[in-house]
Amino acid sequence: MLTLTENASTIVREISTQPGLPETAGLRITSEGTTEPSFAVSAADQAQEGDQIVEQGGATIFLDEAAALMLADKVLDAAVDASGKVEFALGTQV
C-alpha cells in the first residue's frame, strides 16, 4: 500500500483541510492510462466508488483502482518550492 513521508502527510493534510472543504476531503490520485505511468493529483470532497483510501498522519489519499495497483510499493513525498507550488515525488518503499 502507498505510504507517505512526513512532509507529504503534512502537505496533503493542509490541502484537504482548507476552509469550505468537507471533513471527508482528501487528495485523489488517478492513473492517466498512458503507456508510461502518469498520474493526476487533485483535491476531492470524498472517495469515489472503488477507490483505495490511504490514511496516514492525519492525511487522506484516495487512489483509483489502477493507481492503487501501480503505487502499492511506493512512497509519496512532497515539498513546496520557492514560489509556493507543491511538488510530489515517488520513491520505492524500503
Image (cartoon, rainbow, N blue to C red):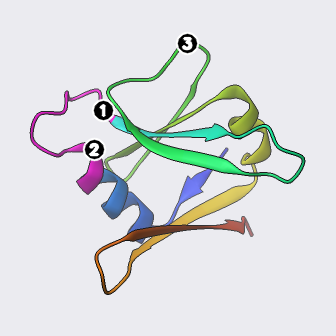
The boundaries of the magenta stretch are 14-25
Q: Amino acid at mark 3?
A: Glu
| Quadrant in which residue 55 is drawn | top left
72 w.r.t. 21: above or below: below
- In this rendering, the answer to whether 45 lies above or below 73 is above
> Would you say the residues marked 2 and 3 are in contact, meaning their CB atoms lie under 8 Å apart?
no
Q: Which residue is mark 2?
A: 16
Q: Position of residue 36 (x, y in %)?
A: 86, 54
Counting residues from the start of the chain, the first of labels 2 and 3 encountered is 2
Q: Is residue 18 magenta?
A: yes
Whole-percent x, y for residue 30 in the image: 62, 37
Disc 1 is placed on an element classified as loop
> Neighbour class for label 1 at 10 Å: few (<14), some, many (≥20)?
many
Residue bearing mark 1 = 25
- Residue 54, percent from left and from top: 51, 39
Label 2: which secondary element: helix
Query: First in sequence: mark 2 or mark 1?
Result: 2
Which residue lies under the disc numbered 3? Answer: 49
- What is the spatial separation of the Cα atoms under label 2 and label 1, in whole angstroms? 5 Å
Is most of the magenta stretch helix, strand or loop? loop
Crowding at label 2, few (<14), some or many (≥20) Cα neighbours within 10 Å? many
Residue 94 lies within the magenta run: no
- Name which residue lies at 79% across and 37% down: 33
